[in-house]
Image (cartoon, rainbow, N blue to C red):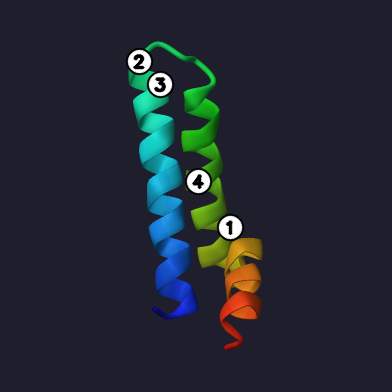
């Protein structure tokens, strides 16, 4: 598995966890959803995301 794919899978799982928490009545699940959304926008604008950097170091790419 490549680093970028692993990072996207992790972001998807975090988003899913946030959605499940929010739907089950935990209001702080919304903060997780906003965090993932804003990090995705941040990554698209400046072409850098800390989790991408971290996964590239782990996978040595």
Label 2: which secondary element: loop
The reply to whether dot 4 and dot 1 touch (C-beta < 8 Å) is no
Residue 1: quarter of image: bottom left
The reply to whether dot 2 and dot 1 touch (C-beta < 8 Å) is no
Q: What's the mark number on residue 42?
A: 1
Q: Which mark lies nearer to you, 4 or 1? A: 4
Q: What's the mark number on residue 24?
A: 2
Does 18 sit above or below residue 12? Answer: above
Tell me which label, 4 or 2, sits earlier in the chain. Answer: 2
Tell me which label, 3 or 1, sits earlier in the chain. Answer: 3
Q: Which mark lies nearer to you, 2 or 1? A: 2
Is 5 situated left or right of 44 in this image? left
> What percent of the width, then of the height, locates residue 60?
61, 86
Is 18 situated left or right of 49 in this image? left
- Residue at mark 4: 36
- Residue at mark 3: 22
Q: Quadrant of the C terminus?
A: bottom right
The Cα–Cα distance between marks 2 and 1, rounded to whole angstroms, is 28 Å
The reply to whether dot 4 and dot 2 touch (C-beta < 8 Å) is no
The Cα–Cα distance between marks 4 and 1, rounded to whole angstroms, is 10 Å
The Cα–Cα distance between marks 4 and 3, rounded to whole angstroms, is 14 Å
The Cα–Cα distance between marks 4 and 2, rounded to whole angstroms, is 19 Å
Tell me which label, 2 or 1, sits earlier in the chain. Answer: 2
> What percent of the width, then of the height, locates residue 30?
48, 26
């Amino acid at each position: 598995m490549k680093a970028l794919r692993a990072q996207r899978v992790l972001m998807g799982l975090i988003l899913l966890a946030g959605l499940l928490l929010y739907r089950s009545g935990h209001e702080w699940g919304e903060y997780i959803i906003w965090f993932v959304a804003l990090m995705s926008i941040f990554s698209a604008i400046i072409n850098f995301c800390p989790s991408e950097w971290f996964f590239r170091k782990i996978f040595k790419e």
